[in-house]
Amino acid sequence: MKQLACLIFCLLSVAAPAVADPDVEAGENEFVASSETTTAATGSGSAQTTSPASDVRYVYEPFCARGAGAGPDVYYGCGDIESCGNDGQLYLVTAVSQSTATPVGTTCVEPGAVAPADVLTPGRILQAFESIPLPEAPLEVQPPGGVTLVNFDTILHTDAQPFTETVQLLNRQITFDIEPSEFTWTLGDGRTLTTTDPGRAWRAGLPMDEYVSHRYVEAGTVRLQLTTTWSARWRLPNGPWRPVDGTVDVTSPAQDLEVTTARPQLVSYD
């Protein structure tokens, strides 16, 4: 207990200015330090040690920057992580023992540094997002049948819907809220079109500016392809939503489209 008391006193002496206690519960976002040795954590302002008679868990949570208009003690419920060091991110370290949770300091994780094994760094969150199987948004073309006309509005659209996925990461339950954020249409004539709109199928009475469309100016065969960019935000159970630092692209299979010309022809009716 003397070691624990010294730890708390020493770390509080280098911690950030006093803030409201974080909402921390044993069993969530934690690891157990139960050896008799002392191990320094990566960064500054935190360390981990226990005595043989105690079972202390040290919890690392992103330390949120104050949002615009927030009061001086509002650090949680925001989106961005507080910066520190050269270009690092700040994490709050909390000691959890039995029914008590005590903030004991902060640690700064610099880019490229080896973070403590149980810290939910942005890179680890992104890796978890990248491991989730994402749906392939199919590319749909109208007119159907793989043929369109020169100087005709060829309509493009896809079906990509937001969804949620929950995964286990470092013994924690992480929920991702995933959505398609951008669509890159490779048109096959040397041009690309980037939209945030997935487009829509043709519907009578809907003006053309409501569609994602393209006019080909030369006849020939072109190869179309669609790349859907997925973005996400994440959260721990009952925690605030935070953006994932990165996106994932999924490209649909290419398909050929024949661009042809139409010739007017008089037809007689008997």
Image: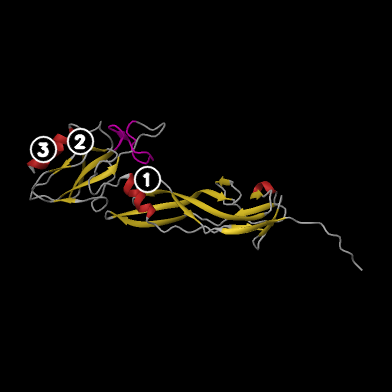
Other residues around mark 2 within 10 Å, as few (<14) / some (14–19) / many (≥20): many
Q: Distance between the residues labelled 1 and 3?
A: 32 Å
- Quadrant including the N terminus: top left
Q: Nearer the viewer, residue 139 or 81?
A: 139
The structure residue drawn at horizontal position 81% and vertical position 57%, both measured from the top left corner, is 264
Residue 109 found in image quarter: top left
Query: The residue under label 2 is which amino acid type?
Result: Gly
- Secondary structure of the residue carrying tag 3 is helix
- Quadrant including the C terminus: bottom right
What are the residue bounds of the magenta stretch?
72-89
In the rendered structure, which disc, 1 or 3, sits on the residue that comes first in sequence? 3
Q: How is the image coloured?
A: secondary structure
By secondary structure, the bulk of the magenta-drawn segment is best described as: loop
Residue 267 found in image quarter: bottom right
- Secondary structure of the residue carrying tag 2 is loop
Task: Please give left or right for residue 60 compared with residue 229 in the image.
Answer: left
Q: Is residue 79 magenta?
A: yes
The residue carrying mark 1 is 240
Query: The residue under label 3 is which amino acid type?
Result: Cys
Q: Where is residue 161 in the image (x, y as percent from the top left)?
A: 51, 55
The structure residue drawn at horizontal position 57% and vertical position 51%, both measured from the top left corner, is 198
The structure residue drawn at horizontal position 25% and vertical position 44%, both measured from the top left corner, is 60
Could you tell me if residue 238 is visible in this image?
no
In the rendered structure, which disc, 3 or 2, sits on the residue that comes first in sequence? 3
Query: The residue under label 1 is which amino acid type?
Result: Pro
Q: Is residue 62 magenta?
A: no
In the rendered structure, which disc, 1 or 2, sits on the residue that comes first in sequence? 2
The residue carrying mark 3 is 6
The residue carrying mark 2 is 45
